């Protein structure tokens, strides 16, 4: 498989402003498949819930999603049924491999076909990750995840996939794991170069989201000030870290969305 080098710089600027806590309408768009074609190949094996090996030995990491860790075998089975022995087309912003030599890409089942990521999300076998992506692409992935959640498909048959921000003990137990958290913002504080969205009155121990002042400033140039989120229900995704209390560090505001129910 030969990758075409197609580096771009517009991806960051799109994600930095246009995805400011948008309320999703569930409409599907084809944004991910409109990214440049990086290459194609036949899938020789499925390594894990989001990694493929092509016939030429290249490894492809599915961009834009995170495995639903509670049921990895079901995701592997679905990914295998969708891709094994079939020719797939890779889309992405550039062809730079990750530190392990894997190509990160949005993978279409044949030219112009459905994205593998979208099918995994729609059947409740993955979660939307935090890879940077154009606005329409991310909206499509979130819409697929929301549809699966509404239909109680796959992992969504459980009612605790999205964690309650008010349960800090549950957050601590998930330290180091990718997690989707939902709750109401109790307060917004600025300390030095960091903005804290606190989801508990015990702001030194309860769950919080941290955002660098630089990222927050870019947001406020394109949308509402973060302080206006006080009292709003927010859904955020990322890896739980434990500092004074459990936190998710937001490096791209696309990690957050309004959850509704205010």
Image (cartoon, grey):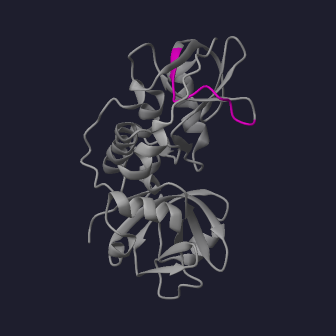
In the rendered image of this protein, does residue 155 appear above or below residue 133?
A: below
Q: Is residue 176 left or right of residue 23?
A: right
**Residue 85 shows in the view:** yes
In the rendered image of this protein, does residue 262 appear above or below residue 147?
A: below
Q: Position of residue 74 (x, y in %)?
A: 55, 37
Please tell me which residue is depicted at 25% across the width and 40% down the height of the picture: 27
Residue 90 lies within the magenta run: yes
Residue 92 lies within the magenta run: yes
Q: Position of residue 197 (x, y in %)?
A: 47, 74
Q: Position of residue 56 (x, y in %)?
A: 70, 11
Quarter of the image for residue 111 reads top left
**How would you classify the magenta stretch by its main secondary structure?**
loop
Q: Position of residue 219 (x, y in %)?
A: 40, 60
- Of 189 and 209, which appears nearest the observer? 189
**Residue 181 shows in the view:** no
- Of 220 and 198, which appears nearest the observer? 220
**Magenta stretch bounds:** 88-99
Please tell me which residue is depicted at 48% across the width and 43% down the height of the picture: 12
In the rendered image of this protein, does residue 86 appear above or below residue 60?
A: above
């Amino acid at each position: 498989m030969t990758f075409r080098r197609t580096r771009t710089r517009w991806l960051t600027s799109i994600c930095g402003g246009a995805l400011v806590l948008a309320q999703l309408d569930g409409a599907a768009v084809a944004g991910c498949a409109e990214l440049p074609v990086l290459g194609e190949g036949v899938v020789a094996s499925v390594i894990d819930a989001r990694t493929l090996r092509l016939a030429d030995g290249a490894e492809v990491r599915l961009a834009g999603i995170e495995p639903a860790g509670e049921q990895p075998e079901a995701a592997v089975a679905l990914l295998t049924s969708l891709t094994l022995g079939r020719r797939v087309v890779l889309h992405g912003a550039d062809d730079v491999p990750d530190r392990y030599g894997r190509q990160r890409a949005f993978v279409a089942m044949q030219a112009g076909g459905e994205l593998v990521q979208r099918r995994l999300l729609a059947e409740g076998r993955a979660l939307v990750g935090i890879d940077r992506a154009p606005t329409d692409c991310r909206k499509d992935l979130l819409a697929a995840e929301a549809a699966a959640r509404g239909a109680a498909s796959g992992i969504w048959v459980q009612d605790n996939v999205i964690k309650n921000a008010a349960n800090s003990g549950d957050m601590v137990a998930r330290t180091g794991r990718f997690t989707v958290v939902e709750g109401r913002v109790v307060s917004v504080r600025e300390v030095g170069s960091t903005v804290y969205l606190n989801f508990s009155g015990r702001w030194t121990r309860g769950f919080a989201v941290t955002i660098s002042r630089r990222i927050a400033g870019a947001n406020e140039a394109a949308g509402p000030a973060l302080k206006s989120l006080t009292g709003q229900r927010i859904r955020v995704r990322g890896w739980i870290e434990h500092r004074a209390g459990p936190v998710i560090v937001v490096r791209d505001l696309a990690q957050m969305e309004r959850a509704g129910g205010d």
